Image (tube, rainbow, N blue to C red):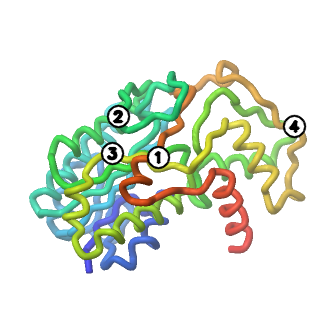
Amino acid sequence: MMRILLTGTSGQVGWELQQSLMTFGEVISAGREIASPSLRMDLSAPDTIRAVIREVKPDLIVNPAAYTAVDKAESEPELAMAVNGIAPGVIAEEAKLLGAGVIHYSTDYVFNGTQARPYTEADATDPQNIYGKTKLAGEQAIQAVGLPHIILRTSWVYGTRGKNFLLTMLKLGREREELKVVNDQMGAPTWSRMIAESTAEILTQGRHDLMGLLSSNSGVYHLTATGQTSWYDFAKAIFELDPNRSQQKLKNLLAIPSSEYPTPAKRPAYSSLDTSKISTQFGVALPNWQQSLELVLSSSSSE
């Protein structure tokens, strides 16, 4: 049975990982909001990262924690870099000293969005905003340490907890009669639970030799739902599949170009990811984004 150190448990993916990783051994949560002083980890303070890892002595560190406020990062680049760019390298250094492995999560925003086909892991990165640049720096920091690791790039993450597009749309649909949503950015909405379950699926293959699995398969993998859509069509599907449609106040959902909804951070116009590598290597394949959305909404209505 493994000892797993898990960060970011208050976030969407981290919360789901708490459930998915339990069957593999002892899952120890660390973060800024943890009550125990010995597990209080602030990713912007490297000393706290080192102290917690040396205290816990894990076999595996799973790090979904991140600075995810894409627009706010434009005005807080140092903090975003500390959490997203520097902290993953510190985690990797400490893991290597222990002989442990690392699973880390990254983003489709490491690409510039000018491509006309889904991005593969071999395509050149070129992030267009601070968030994407700091997440890419985190990937590179882990790779530079040279320990057994898996980096999972995902996209448009949503779920039933925290702050995300799904929950925002459901809330606004009950408050407003008209909404405008951009229709010229394409990607794959991905359910946080699917990310966590896919992580567990990979780990199952290394149940008897975790470090062997991570060592022989170290690298970057794309993990998203299949298919692609725009934010507008994602919103449209949310309202159509909402099990509580009767509570909606919304009458008009309007598609607009990004130029009509300026944001501090530039988003890639196209950020679909090719997931064939993770499918070939680990047999992991997520459902179509629409199927996942149906599952989320039906499960949240019954909870």
The amino acid on which the numbered mark 3 sits, given as a three-letter code, is Val
| Disc 3, SS | strand
Gap between marks 4 and 3 measured at Cα: 41 Å
| Disc 2, SS | loop
Q: Using the image as rendered, state which of residue 268 and residue 176 is in the foreground.
A: 268
Question: Within 10 Å of the Cα at label 4, are there few (<14), some (14-19), or many (20+) other Cα atoms?
Answer: few
Q: Using the image as rendered, state which of residue 205 and residue 192 is in the foreground.
A: 205
Q: Which mark is residue 201?
A: none
How far from the left and from the top, in percent, is residue 134? 34, 35
Q: Is residue 112 visible?
A: yes
Residue located farthest toward the front when viewing the structure as drawn = 280
* 94 left or right, relative to 262: left
- Residue where numbered disc 4 is placed: 252
- Residue where numbered disc 3 is placed: 220
4 or 2: tag closer to the N-terminus: 2
The amino acid on which the numbered mark 4 sits, given as a three-letter code, is Asn
How far from the left and from the top, in percent, is residue 252? 87, 37
